[in-house]
Every structure is written in structure tokens, then in C-alpha cells.
Amino acid sequence: MKHFLITSYLLLSIVSISYGQSKTDTLINYIEVIGTSKIEVTPDEIILEIGLQEYWIDELQENKTKISIDSITKQIEFTLDTMSLSKDIFIHSENIQFATSSSKNFRNTGKIQLQLKTFDQVHSIMRKLKSQGILYMRVVELRNKELAKHLELVKTQAMANSKIEATLLLSSTFKRLGDLISVEELYNPLEPVLSDEEKFTQRVNPASKKTVTNKKIILQYSVKTRYMLL
């Protein structure tokens, strides 16, 4: 079941302008309202990125063994298998090699991305994975299969909010709301955004076993509308 929250913010100014001066000097009164709608959508796909780095076994020994990115990835695959998570959740794997490095102690890095369905899965993986070889774990993308429908809803709601509030604000005056004169798009939610406290780039130290906050896809839309006053 999807949950969403709609809020709106409105700015009102009643002004007079000289309209169509090339033909007439008729003075037209209008009301200008900025309507903003925000919807929080529950994601049905969560992309978890895990940063990897090679590490040493018996690092203080002369014949120490380096654990490669491929080996770390296989360890993660084994752990996920014990959690009954399919290998199909692996959607991206990248091994960053630095062949030009001459240092014997140099450690290559890499990353993998997992496609999950719930934040319960995200939290379980973060608690289960060992810290060795893992630089970070972070949510990099939230998806929803019905995002286009929610985008249309947030646009419609912003327009409706502006008209409703304009009507309410005029209810205490002798003016009535007339036809719509113009619409200016101020914010277009072509891409989902997060609030300041819910950034995609939140990093988690795997050693701390800290979990990420359950995040929502936040869609915002703002329009500036002008209505004629009667």
C-alpha cells in the first residue's frame, strides 16, 4: 500500500498591471498565487551500493596474503546465499584496477550494486556482512514502478491548491475569481529528490552496524498562476 503526504505553500499578491498597451490601456486586476505540492512515495526498488577494497591476511607477516576484489565479492555472494537472497539482485559489479601502481602494499578497489525490494533487506545485509574488505554501504537510488502516475498527481495537486487558496483568500473581499490568465512552471519534478536529511549519499560504516533511515521518494512541483479578478 502506498502512502503519500501532500503539503502546499502559497504566496499571494494582488496587483494591477497595464495589459495590452499596444491596443488598449485597460487596467486589469489579477491575483497571483504560487502553489507547491509535495508527495512522499514508498519505493518498491532500492539500489544498495557496497564499496570494496582489497585487504591483507596476516598483514604483519612477511608472506602476507592479499584478498582480491573478486574474492570479497564471492564472500558477499556466499553471505547473501545464506540469507536466501538470489544472485539476481546483483545488477552491477565494478573492479577498479590500478596496474600502473608499483607499490606492493597498494590495494585495488571496486563496488557492487544490489537491487532490493524493502529496507528490511537493506538493514539485514548491513548487519550480516563482515567489515573486512568493505569501505562503505549506501543507498544510491530509489525507484517506484508507478512513478509517472505520482508525477502527474503532484502536478494536478499543485494547480488545484493554487485555485482553492486563491478563492479562499478572496472570500473576505468584494472580488471574485475569474479566468486563468497564465501559468508559469517553477519546479518540475522530472527526477525524484530527497529532503536535506535524507540524502542518497549517506554512508554507513560497516563496523558500526548502523542502519539507514527508511527513505521515501519525494516529488515536488510548483507553479505560479494568475487569475483575473471580477
Image (cartoon, rainbow, N blue to C red):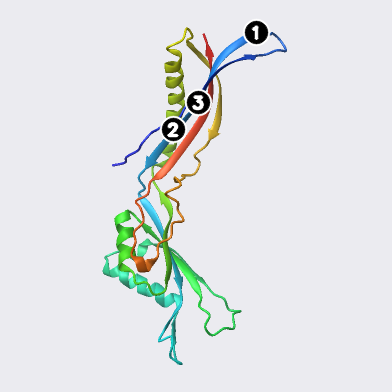
Q: State the residue position of label 2.
A: 37
Amino acid at pointer 3: Leu
Badge 3 density bin: few <14, some 14–19, many ≥20, Cα 10 Å: few
Q: Earlier in the sequence, mark 1 or mark 3?
A: 3
Amino acid at pointer 2: Ser
Q: Residue furthest bottom?
A: 62
Quadrant in which the N terminus is drawn = top left
Location of residue 4 (image quadrant):
top left
* Residue 24 position (above or below residue 95): above
Location of residue 219 (image quadrant):
top left
133 and 208: which one is in front?
208
* Residue 220 position (above or below residue 226): below
Q: Looking at the picture, how far across and down is residue 229, in whole percent? A: 52, 11
Q: Looking at the picture, how far across and down is residue 39, in whole percent? A: 40, 37
Amino acid at pointer 1: Thr
Task: Look at 68% across and 8% down and name the residue there.
Answer: 25
Badge 1 density bin: few <14, some 14–19, many ≥20, Cα 10 Å: few
Q: Earlier in the sequence, mark 2 or mark 1?
A: 1
Badge 2 density bin: few <14, some 14–19, many ≥20, Cα 10 Å: many
* Residue 143 position (above or below residue 75): above
Q: Looking at the picture, how far across and down is residue 53, in whole percent? A: 46, 73
Q: Check disc 2 and report its element: helix, strand or loop.
A: strand
Q: CA distance from mark 3 to mark 2?
A: 13 Å
Q: State the residue position of label 3.
A: 11
* Residue 3 position (above or below residue 48): above
Question: Total marks drawn?
Answer: 3
Label at residue 26: 1
Q: Check disc 1 and report its element: helix, strand or loop.
A: loop
